[in-house]
Amino acid sequence: LSSQFESLDYEPWESRVFKEESSKKTPSSLTKQGITRWVVVFFIGVCTALIACTIDICVVEITKLKYGFLKKYIDKCVTENCLYMPYLLWLGISCGFAFIASVLVTYGEPVAAGSGIPLVKCYLNGINVHRLHRLKTLFVKAAGVTCSVLGGLAVGKEGPMVHSGAAVAAGLSQGKSTSLGFDFGILKEFRCDQEKRDFVTGGAAAGVAAAFGAPIGGVLFSLEEGSSFWNQNMTWRIFFCSMVSAFTLNVVLSAYHGQIGQLAYDGLLNFGKFPDIPFTLLELPIFIGMGIIGGLIGALFNQMNYHISVFRRRFIVSRWAKVLEVIVVCCVTVTAGFVMIYCVNDCKPLGPKDDIDFPIQMFCEDGQFNAVAAMWFQTPEASVRALFHDQPGTHNPLSVGLFFITYVFLACWTYGLSISSGIFIPALLSGAAWGRLVGLGLYRLTEGAAWADPGKYALIGAASQLGGIARVTLSLAVILIETTGNLSLGLGLMLTLLTAKLVGDCFNAGIYDMNVQLAGLPMLPWSSPPLCYGTQARDIMSKPVVVLREVERVSTVLSVLEETRHQGFPLIFENRFSGSQGNQNSFGMLRGLILRSQLKILLKEKAFCSSPTGSASQPPVSLETFRMYYPRYPTFQGMHFTEEERSSYLDLRPYLNPTPYTVPMHASLPRTFQLFRALGLRHLIVTDDNNEVVGMITRKTLARYR
Amino acid sequence: LSSQFESLDYEPWESRVFKEESSKKTPSSLTKQGITRWVVVFFIGVCTALIACTIDICVVEITKLKYGFLKKYIDKCVTENCLYMPYLLWLGISCGFAFIASVLVTYGEPVAAGSGIPLVKCYLNGINVHRLHRLKTLFVKAAGVTCSVLGGLAVGKEGPMVHSGAAVAAGLSQGKSTSLGFDFGILKEFRCDQEKRDFVTGGAAAGVAAAFGAPIGGVLFSLEEGSSFWNQNMTWRIFFCSMVSAFTLNVVLSAYHGQIGQLAYDGLLNFGKFPDIPFTLLELPIFIGMGIIGGLIGALFNQMNYHISVFRRRFIVSRWAKVLEVIVVCCVTVTAGFVMIYCVNDCKPLGPKDDIDFPIQMFCEDGQFNAVAAMWFQTPEASVRALFHDQPGTHNPLSVGLFFITYVFLACWTYGLSISSGIFIPALLSGAAWGRLVGLGLYRLTEGAAWADPGKYALIGAASQLGGIARVTLSLAVILIETTGNLSLGLGLMLTLLTAKLVGDCFNAGIYDMNVQLAGLPMLPWSSPPLCYGTQARDIMSKPVVVLREVERVSTVLSVLEETRHQGFPLIFENRFSGSQGNQNSFGMLRGLILRSQLKILLKEKAFCSSPTGSASQPPVSLETFRMYYPRYPTFQGMHFTEEERSSYLDLRPYLNPTPYTVPMHASLPRTFQLFRALGLRHLIVTDDNNEVVGMITRKTLARYR
Ligand SMILES: Nc1ncnc2c1ncn2[C@@H]1O[C@H](COP(=O)(O)OP(=O)(O)OP(=O)(O)O)[C@@H](O)[C@H]1O
Ligand SMILES: Nc1ncnc2c1ncn2[C@@H]1O[C@H](COP(=O)(O)OP(=O)(O)OP(=O)(O)O)[C@@H](O)[C@H]1O
Ligand SMILES: [Mg+2]
Ligand SMILES: [Mg+2]
């Protein structure tokens, strides 16, 4: 577990200043706050969708330019025998984009690397991932993923959308931007970790809704994968957020496709609309079988990716090496594509029904096109669509098989590179490839029975592969149902997904959880490990505990802050070693808890008093001031204290949390874990029978037990 | 709040005997338990679906017989002028069924009355509703709802399916039936409230899945409405359960309709399949407007129903009066139907496309049929289907309007009668009626524009009305999407539902919550009331606290059990009034907690020892024995104690929970509430600064604050 990550404060901090402030609140101010929440959520939905649209339109337009340009050269060079030319051009263009994508992330904002879903998950779990929601991160993520996709890498733009949505939510809900240095002075009541988290959950849902046009899928994704804390009142806001997002996307994309004012734009179903395909009871074993295959391939994929990541962490550390690796992967990808197009001569007649932007003729006869080239000469998303919807005869089993092997290998290598990239589309694409193979086999076996539709099996394969890799079930089923507009296959999809998940779980964790573990993020699982009732709180707690008194000398506070790195300090009543009741292990009677950040603000504000009994005359530092510093607390640099100040006192009583959560030292690990996890705590103080402090339990103490 | 309801014990009880037992568990026994869970869940899904199929098929077949029979008479009597005959026959048949439905519930099992959803909600919230899951309840519910529907009342069979699913789950997961008096001796590890609750959540989802053929809707319903505690691991099992249920239903109903082995049986979409209907941005205001109307009508409906329920509680108390009321409502319903058919002469030509089982000609010309009669001569479900799918010209606006007013009034009167009945279908039907009116208006205004499809607006109206009454949004949207097979309307549906909910919430609570409040069920809301940081735990706690010592005299235990009705007793170390530290309000140093049920079992088992220091030699009563008594604990009747036994001691140390949850007496109400609610506690002990017991907080203490 890495010590660089700190936790978020999800508990309401019931100090005296807080209670005084909240006693002044009126029901009408609460109503106002409630309405403001809905308004903020509305804008989160809209902005997330607009970002998604921008990315989408950029990708579509530039891809068209890119492959249109290349097609011209290929068509010319096939006859003139200069095929190295389009190859080099292809390489150049792709590497150019890949280079930008990689430099942006590596030198700009490393936290924007990867899909972002694991980090958002951790944030919602309560870990403060630095710079996760900065404006710069958002920009790098959005621009980076556009370039990665344009670079022709085996990546999708869907995962990053979740991160973008989360960043938008975190930004908008604060009413200020520290990066840009302005503060609208609004939404001040939302400037705390807890409120922010709720908005981020909505933003993540909006991200999925915008990425796939799947509002219900978005809510479920947020629920299944993201959120660690859930509550019914939140559901409706999240739902609203992802609905607004899907609406906006629909309106904008409809307008972009020339149907202004229309809403039923089919492009929202970005994997194409599936007609109703019947399925029979006899197919259930096939679905289960495909689920098992998907689970196995997924587990293998995750394992391979794990080893690659470990290798990367050890040997590819410097920045330029990371950029170089991206370039290498990009070259390999382009080369693989080119070699396949060159070698596999899978010619198909070009019918009027074929929906291919750039049919490449290559060595095919006139009126025919190279089906392999069609797979490479478009965005991965379009390839998924092709595998789902092309006529049974379009693809040669051999070339699909070859494509699958190449692509799954590339995807595995690509995921984890220093670019922003999602795993959804690559997984769906490779799954669709083998799924289609299965479908083609069945089609031939049954001599073209109506139910043996290769497109249907491509869909099942895609679901199964993604289920095996990401281990998402419910939300994925809904997302696939929503994006394909097909409900009748719902049951089949669910069965496959559940099987894939269960099979995969026998071998290893899902890819997101693997990322979390690799990064050493102290994420708390849903429940404590089984069979650990024998372990007690006192066995795992940290001690000795660094404690402070309710009214403490400034010099003591300063030295404690400088000497330790703890984030919270229990406050005691008696002097440290007066040892009431003679318990040698105790550090004093518990009176409250104070956070490091609060101490820093108090020091910065110089809220000192001269007498050790505290001073009642001086008005306490207001909550307003505390919120002003959020979320970037002052550092010691630039803080100077005179000798007189050092020998004066800090009266912590108005600011301390007088009733921090405690756990008796004999409590079992499951009970301790449950308390910590269900309430989203940050500090849990271990007490003995007399309510005296004997130890401290924090996130990292518990995250070790999984 | 009624004191007749006790709570469930959701906390794991970490006593010494429990820890010893769990230390013997091996990972393989855990795996076995995990697999068993999935198997049990599978059977829950299957059985729930089979019950749903049985109800469905019975209703369909007998309805056919009933209306076929009546139609013959009507056709004859219209010419022979003896229309009182079919009227009396109709009255007789309907009242017969209504009588059976009512007697079953009133005399058989009163807990089976109503929709059952509020009770299941309360159960999942942690309230032990007596007899809720008995076999008899299940039977009465299933048979009762069949008869209610057959009686032609304004009821649906969907709500009761949720209850049936829950009852199936609670029964199957225990591996025994106390009613039938057999015990398979299996699944003993699931005999505790916590495990049972998890299965019941799955069963409720399976119920929705079977009622509507909507597996995802089922999971969401369980999440949104039912479950108060949620955890990711559970999601997948619930998902599996509702999937299995939908599968089974599909297979059985397909077979019933003669398509053995098929799975894409459209009948699963029991509101008929909607084709893709486009909608434009301009319709959004219409949807929002309809949402507002639905919210208003819903609020009015709830308010009226509330007053009717209050009236009923005061004046209709004896059993025969309840049965009589049902008969009266049934007569009014039939009469209303008959009068409408007689008076409104809404004749339509009978086309080949019309899907009407029993077209009644009445006073219409040959080749025509009475459109009003068609609405009454079928199950409410079929009427909903008709309003969704009939051609624009089928219904006369005036007769639809009349139907709406009559039906909404009947539904309001019917809901809450002493029969088992759901509100889903009546709400959808009345909503579909006014929705269709709106649609017809738009159709005329726009002179038949493609988007102004009356069926589409009927759907939106139905959703809005149900949203306004039940205040369910997310899951309802999914259910409607799943049952109509239409995704493109999804966004419109969601918008309408959310509006209806928000508007309705301005006036009163949803109908289920109203039922809960009326019945005095101590359900805990999701969060504590706002603005109550000033209230402290010590202000709300009960005191004096009845405490026991760790090793206590049998006679003391007996007198405490007889004199008080508390369900849990804190155990203290010192003698009651030795008053350590001189705190006058304290009842002693906390050592643990014991439940009334455990004390009763220990007394019954006569686990006594002679010395006040306890006896180590005697093996403690095993957990096995505790489970044997679950869930019906011994009563004092038949327990006799000799004088010697009375003066011996009960050593509670192996059975007590050594680390019960406590809260400091200065903690605020929100913090106390949060702790209690998030962890699903039953007892929360209030302690002072020295960890001495000063008060007690339980569900009913907190349920008062809402
Ligand atoms: N006041 C304290 N006295 C002694 N040990 C402490 C104290 N506070 C925390 N610890 C222990 O020191 C370690 C690091 O402290 P820290 O406060 O950074 O916790 P953490 O687990 O990193 O959680 P956070 O994310 O809140 O920083 C933890 O193992 C914790 O148990
Ligand atoms: N040991 C006790 N000593 C004193 N008062 C108690 C004790 N246990 C409970 N009470 C109080 O007595 C009342 C009824 O007790 P009871 O145990 O029946 O609780 P309840 O709220 O009905 O919850 P439950 O559903 O568990 O029965 C509650 O107000 C509770 O606060
Ligand atoms: Mg730390
Ligand atoms: Mg009670």
Image (tube, coloured by chain):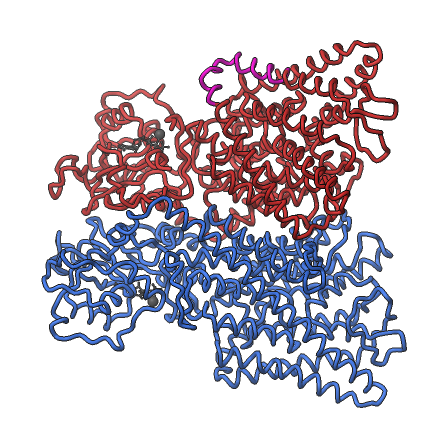
Chain colours: A red, B blue
Q: Position of residue A602 (x, y in %)?
A: 33, 31
Q: What is the residue that sits farthest to the right in this orientation?
A: B366
Is B463 part of what is drawn in magenta? no
> Which image quarter is the N terminus of chain A in?
top left
Residue at coordinates 79% horizontally, 28% vertically from top-left?
A: A357
Q: In this rendering, would B139 be left or right of A399?
A: left
Q: Is residue A649 left or right of residue B470?
A: left
Q: How many marks?
A: 0
Q: Position of residue B644 (x, y in %)?
A: 11, 72
Q: Main secondary structure of the magenta part?
A: helix
Q: Is residue A465 above or below residue A638?
A: below
* Nearest to the observer: residue A495 or residue B413: A495
Range shown magenta: A310-331
Residue B85, above or below B347: below
Name the residue rendered at 78%, 85% in the picture.
B73
Q: Position of residue B451 (x, y in %)?
A: 80, 52
Q: Residue at x 57, y 69 (%)?
A: B303
Ligand 2, seen in the image, is in the quarter at: bottom left
Give percent across and percent down for residue B100. 57, 81
Q: Quadrant of the C terminus of chain A?
A: top left
Residue A45 seen: no
Q: Viewed as shown, does residue B44 lie left or right of A57? A: left
Whether residue A262 can be seen here: yes
Query: In front here: B662 or B151?
Result: B151
The residue lying at 74 percent from left, 24 percent from top is A377
Q: Which quadrant would residue A41 be assigned to in this image?
A: top right
Q: Nearer the viewer, residue B288 or A266?
A: A266
